[in-house]
Image (cartoon, rainbow, N blue to C red):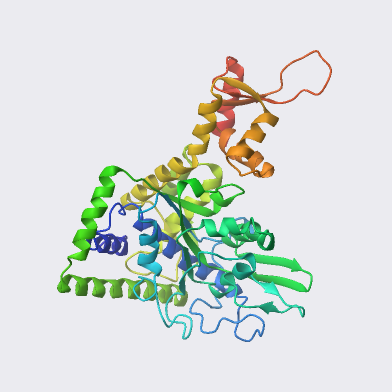
């Protein structure tokens, strides 16, 4: 089958089920599973939920082990989870993909024994409405954690949200104003830490989140874009017709076809479960990235803050090799399948993340605008009123553009000289040269 054998079986499975426009998306979900397993190898020896801990206990967790970490860039314990956010209109198949893996009973990762005997992965479709306390926990008057917060309960599992805006919307409610901050840190490094009047909520979690959202509800401010792998699902009239025809074929499947698909789903579920146990019982001794990976990531189209996301994708892909080879360094190298996956992923991410950049460019092209005014506009139209996030958004998305320049105008008058932003080419060749130099260095 080659290194991507399980990915091919997944794509063949979706074709047999008459799924539309998923050939470039299903592999990302597969790599997310591989990266999730690698994260368990690297971090689950530092488990907060040991059975002998009366406050935190997740019994029979198959990911818990005593192996030392193997991936520690900059002497830090790296987190390699790939969280996925799909952007698409209603009816574009966002929920279909998440449910294919996580739905109760039929999901390709679902295991009814996962919460009880520790067999397989924990999976859950998240609620349509949730509070910050329900997601991350709270304490009673005695300082004890109350209830079963999802982030703790789903440690080591996969949590899906058909509409992820339910999480960001919760941040607007008085009782859940800390939702966004807790979400950012738990998705990034797994840390949940809250100081409350009666005590602390403090633990590390390793859940992987998959979610969907409609374009009008996409909120990528305040660092969420750094935590999610973006999948763009476009809808056209032709594609809507394909969906209708596919639904007809799905409804008319024969008994033999359904039995064959059920057997295949069982095989895929067992494959991922077996790979999890193989990797935990016989982990690699380290990780080595081939120069071919570095060369692709160093391309100018890949932003510096995105590099680690694509590196994680390469790790997840390598974890899905047909034959597991533990006990030695895992070599992450490029092949034609991984190259194609990285290319399509980059195109989808640019399509989503650069939409706001194009909006600013088109709105202010060939204009000079003060930095303070630009910050107000970005805060209004992009970061939902978050001024600090607007500053970060400009630094991450506009500053690297060759057509964006900041300068302080020369003036003999009194008063503070404000920074002016030019959206468009500059007539100063030295300024353009400096801009190109800064971009090349980054």
Residue placed furthest toward the right: 414
- Vertical placement of 284 versus 216: above or below? below
Looking at the picture, tell me which residue is in the foreground, 276 or 152: 152
Say whether residue 366 is visible.
Answer: yes
Quadrant holding the C terminus: top right
- Residue 330 in the image: state x and y as whole percent: 44, 62
Give the residue drawn at x 46%, y 71%. Answer: 124
Give the residue drawn at x 66%, y 39%. Answer: 391
- The image quarter containing residue 373 is top right
- Vertical placement of 366 versus 331: above or below? above
Q: Is residue 41 left or right of residue 196?
A: left
- Residue 351 in the image: state x and y as whole percent: 43, 41
- The image quarter containing residue 59 is bottom right
- Vertical placement of 258 versus 118: above or below? above
Looking at the picture, tell me which residue is in the foreground, 434 or 125: 125
Give the residue drawn at x 37%, y 70%. Answer: 324
Looking at the picture, tell me which residue is in the foreground, 39 or 238: 238
Residue placed furthest toward the top: 412
Q: Is residue 79 left or right of residue 288?
A: right
Count of numbered circles on the image: 0
- Residue 349 in the image: state x and y as whole percent: 45, 45
Quadrant holding the N terminus: bottom left
Say whether residue 295 is visible.
Answer: no
Give the residue drawn at x 40%, y 49%. Answer: 89
Q: Is residue 137 left or right of residue 155?
A: right
- Residue 311 in the image: state x and y as whole percent: 48, 53
């Amino acid at each position: 089958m080659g290194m991507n054998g399980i990915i091919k079986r997944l794509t063949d499975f979706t074709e047999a089920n008459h799924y539309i426009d998923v050939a470039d998306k299903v592999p990302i979900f597969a790599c997310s599973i591989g990266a999730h397993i690698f994260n368990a190898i690297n971090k689950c020896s530092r488990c907060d939920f040991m059975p002998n801990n009366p406050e935190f206990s997740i019994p029979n967790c198959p990911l818990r082990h005593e192996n030392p970490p193997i991936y520690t860039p900059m002497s830090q314990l790296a987190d390699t989870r790939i969280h996925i956010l799909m952007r698409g209109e209603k009816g574009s198949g966002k929920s279909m993909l998440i449910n294919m893996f996580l739905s109760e009973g039929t999901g390709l990762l679902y295991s009814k024994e996962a919460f009880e005997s520790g067999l397989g992965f924990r999976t859950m479709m998240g609620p349509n409405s949730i509070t910050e306390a329900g997601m991350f926990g709270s304490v009673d008057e005695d300082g004890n954690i109350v209830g079963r917060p999802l982030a703790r309960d789903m440690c080591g599992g996969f949590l899906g949200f058909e509409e992820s805006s339910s999480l960001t919307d919760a941040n607007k409610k008085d009782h859940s104003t800390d939702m966004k901050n807790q979400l950012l840190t738990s998705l990034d490094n797994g840390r949940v830490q809250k100081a409350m009047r009666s005590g602390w909520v403090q633990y590390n979690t390793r859940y992987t989140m998959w979610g969907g959202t409609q374009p009008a509800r996409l909120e990528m401010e305040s660092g969420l874009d750094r935590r999610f792998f973006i999948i763009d699902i476009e809808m056209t009239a032709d594609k809507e017709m394909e969906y209708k025809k596919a639904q007809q074929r799905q409804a008319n499947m024969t008994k033999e076809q359904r039995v064959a698909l059920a057997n295949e789903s069982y095989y895929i579920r067992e494959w991922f479960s077996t790979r999890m146990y193989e990797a935990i019982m016989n982990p690699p001794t380290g990780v080595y990235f081939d120069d071919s990976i570095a060369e692709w990531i160093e391309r100018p189209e890949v932003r510096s803050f995105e590099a680690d996301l694509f590196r994680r994708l390469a790790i997840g892909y390598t974890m899905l090799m047909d034959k597991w080879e533990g006990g030695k360094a895992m070599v992450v190298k490029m092949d034609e399948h991984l190259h194609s996956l990285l290319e399509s992923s980059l195109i989808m991410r640019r399509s989503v993340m650069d939409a706001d950049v194009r909006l600013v460019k088109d709105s202010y092209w060939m204009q000079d605008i003060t930095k303070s005014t630009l910050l107000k506009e970005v805060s209004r139209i992009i970061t939902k009123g978050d001024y600090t996030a607007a500053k970060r958004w400009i630094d991450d998305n506009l500053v690297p553009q060759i057509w964006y320049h900041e300068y302080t105008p020369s003036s003999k008058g009194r008063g503070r000289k404000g920074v002016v932003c030019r959206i468009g080419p500059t007539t100063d060749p030295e300024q353009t040269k400096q801009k190109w130099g800064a971009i090349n260095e980054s």
